[in-house]
């Protein structure tokens, strides 16, 4: 784990973000507070990738419902 002062972190923020992809980074302030930074893994799934729903509705039922909402 790499440790940086607040000033170092501020001056080298891009470098610190790159480093945080590989390992945890600690940032220390003069007042003694300590912050930890590490990257999160991205979800590879699309938010539109959802489980289907079983129903007895036919294509005609769905198209009729759409026409009804548009006509009103």
Image: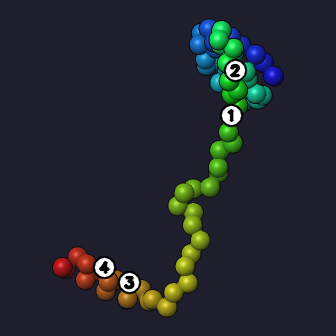
Q: Is residue 34 above or below residue 7?
A: below
Element carrying mark 2:
strand
Disc 4 vs disc 1: which is toward the camera? Answer: 1
Residue 12 showing in the rendered view: no
Specify whether 2 is left or right of 53. Answer: right
Identify residue for label 2: 34
Quarter of the C terminus within the rendering: bottom left
Q: Which numbered disc flags the more N-terminal residue, 2 or 3?
A: 2
Tell me the CA gap for discs 4 and 1: 44 Å
Tell me the CA gap for discs 2 and 4: 56 Å
Report the residue at 64% width, 49% height from top.
43
Q: Are marks 4 and 3 in contact (CB under 8 Å)?
A: yes
Identify residue for label 4: 66
In-front residue for pair 36/2:
36
Q: Are marks 2 and 3 in contact (CB under 8 Å)?
A: no
Residue 55, horizontal then vertical, whole percent = 51, 87
Q: Is residue 7 above or below residue 45?
A: above
Identify residue for label 1: 39
Disc 2 vs disc 1: which is toward the camera? Answer: 2
Element carrying mark 4:
helix
Mark 1, Cα crowd under 10 Å, few <14 / some 14-19 / many 20+, is some
Report the residue at 57% width, 63% height from top.
49
Element carrying mark 1:
loop
Mark 3, Cα crowd under 10 Å, few <14 / some 14-19 / many 20+, is few
Residue 37, horizontal then vertical, whole percent = 68, 28
Identify residue for label 3: 62
Disc 2 vs disc 3: which is toward the camera? Answer: 2
Element carrying mark 3:
helix
Disc 2 vs disc 4: which is toward the camera? Answer: 2
Disc 3 vs disc 1: which is toward the camera? Answer: 1
Residue 66, horizontal then vertical, whole percent = 30, 79
């Amino acid at each position: 784990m790499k440790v940086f002062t607040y000033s170092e972190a501020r001056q080298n923020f891009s470098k610190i973000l790159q480093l945080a992809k590989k390992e945890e980074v600690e940032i220390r302030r003069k007042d003694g507070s300590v912050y930890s930074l590490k990257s999160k893994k991205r979800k590879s799934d699309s938010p539109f990738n959802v489980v289907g729903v079983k129903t007895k509705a036919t294509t005609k039922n769905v198209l009729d419902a759409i026409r009804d909402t548009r006509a009103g």
